[in-house]
Image (cartoon, grey):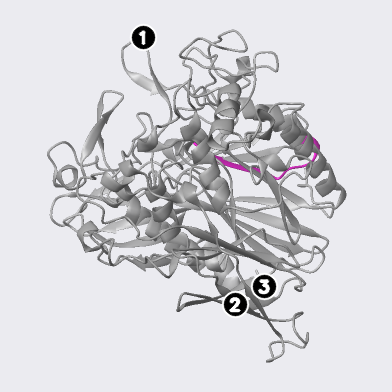
Amino acid sequence: MNKAFPALLAAAVLATPAIVFPVAGDSPSSRASAAETPGEGGFRVLPYLQNPKSDAMTINWISSSETPGKLTLTGPGIGNGKGKGAGNVRTLTSTPEYQPLLDYTDKEKSQVIRGLDQGSWLIQGSNFKHSLTVDGLKPGKEYTYTVEQDGQRHESTFTTAPDQNSWDHVRIVAFSDSETEPQGRTEHREWELSPVNGYAEGSEKRPGAGSVFAEKFGSTTRYGEFTLRYPMNQDTAMKQNMATIEQADPDLMMIAGDLVQGAGYQPAWDEFFGYVAGQHGELASSVPLITALGNWETYAAINGGYGTAADRSPAVISRNKYLTYFDNDGDPANPQYKSSYYRTDHGPVTVLTLDSTNGVPDEDTRTGTLSNPVFSGDDSNLTAENLSTDTQGEFTAADYDSAFTKVFPGTATGDSDLPNMNPGSAQWEWAQKQLADARAEGRIVLVQFHHSAYSNGVHGTPPNHEFADNQSGTAMRTYSPMFEKYGVAAVIAGHDEMFERSFVDEDGDGSGFHSYDVGVAADGLRGEQLVENAEGTFEPLRFNTRSQWSAAADQPELWETGGNGKPKLVDGGLHYGHLQIDIERKGAGAEITLSPVYVFPVLDENYNLVETERRVYDDVVTLQVDADGTVAG
């Protein structure tokens, strides 16, 4: 953040509520039709920032035509080098590249979505990618740029990363599991309630079956119990979450996977970029996106899901749609993995993004393919000897690599873009080298990947557990000793969609790292994993003994009776939101503040959404950092 950390804004981090966001009327039927949506001869995706550095920035955009675009950049260090004068301008022309993987399939063109006019979500035209990197920039400086494409003009600014030794404050916002799709415009997700700590003292109960609330937003059944659906649909939730984030003015935005509801489903990408570089928001034009692959980035939705054992091309196409959009400096020794895993340095911070979507040996609960014997209980029974080795049982690495050669003729299986995450792998060796380098440079280290290794959610138990999960992130615990050795401050993940924080200190020396599930962007709002006890009722399993806090378990809802006699939510519960990470310089060291922000829906007496409020859960964590970049013990 190229500014001082204002006292008022610092106070707002802890204030609740802090900021109010009015809700504009935007019913699904009011959306533009395909003919009115940007199409031939213009931006399909507005310019968005990638691969941020202290001396360079990459600017990508997608157009609907093959016309070259023009980028004009103004700022210090270019042209005559004397500031923002007329001579301090650089102009570049793009070379558009056609991206056939991004074209709509026949199934997408003919899809019917309940509540939406058929095809109203589709965008006309083809997909041509433009990517320009501007270098020779100055650290910590603001630059203004315009992109002209087919008569359309987009203007924005960005600030380069500050020098490691010349900074005051850095703000990063992190979330996961936005899982965008057109159906999100009408869908309200399940809203689970803890069976053991659902209500605050003195609270009324939630509205029940047949209530106005249930009739308005819907209901479902979870663990045999009536469960309300959330009062904001996914589309509104994403808009409000992004509006709250934009107000925070972050320097970087981390998205720990599951950006879309199926990366092989093009309308899901159209929706995602509509929120960050399109008609609903432009934050990615000024704030770089630091993204990770999630399980949904290997899934093609209506275009074949994960594929079949005989043909995993849907998974290959899905990953490569993601890799088409995002450009970062990956592992130079293994260029075939592209931006699957990469490093980002910003001032005093290093962010390592890992790819947790595959491990070997492959495991699959459905076939009984397990690396280690089945065990029961919590993770005190989990050891290095029975740790799982894979994070998904949907496809094998060999099947994926074989399908890669079919999707991309002329390639060999060794050209596959799918890394694995296990000890001794290329990704493992790269991560260890980067962590050692960051530590030698005295950096504050954050790590992100999708599959949360520490969770009390439905994905928290490994495939070799009595209550097994076939997409568990437990295998990523193999990195924990490495993270502790090199002084990682926090790990950001998602997948379980419940907002949870764990503290990991595997060697018991009192120092460790905080591990977050921030999967509350705009999709599911799941509670803890429940299992049936001897009495036939469901109770939390709580496999993760490192858990320190979760919104589902530790933030009971407070309802009161409104003036019309209907229950009204006052506070508490699981809501959509994000993690705000503030790093402030303190002498030779620094202070890190991690604030779990939630976007609280304010409803009128008839349960219409009036506005949302930015609030902060009472689990703000403050860490003191020594001069060497490690958290003080």
Residue 535, percent across and down? Answer: 32, 11
**Residue sitting at the far right:** 440
Whether residue 545 is visible here, answered yes or no, is no
Label 3, label 2: how many angstroms apart (C-alpha)?
A: 17 Å
Instruction: Identify which residue, 306 or 506, lies in the foreground.
Output: 306
Q: Which residues are magenta?
A: 484-495
Asked which secondary structure carries label 3, the reply is loop
Kindly identify which residue carries mark 1: 534
Kindly identify which residue carries mark 2: 145
Residue 382, compared with residue 307, is above or below; it is above
Q: Is residue 486 magenta?
A: yes
Which image quadrant for residue 478?
top right
Asked which secondary structure carries label 2, the reply is strand
Which image quadrant for residue 9?
bottom right
**Is 194 situated left or right of 343 in this image?**
left
Q: Residue at x 44, y 23 (%)?
A: 308
Which image quadrant for residue 615?
bottom left
**Is 385 situated left or right of 45 in this image?**
right
Residue 405, compared with residue 103, is above or below; it is above
Mark 1 or mark 3: which is in front? 3
Q: Is residue 314 magenta?
A: no
Identify the image quadrant of the C terminus: top right
Q: Residue at x 60, y 22 (%)?
A: 398
Kindly identify which residue carries mark 3: 2
Circle nearer the N terminus (1, 3): 3
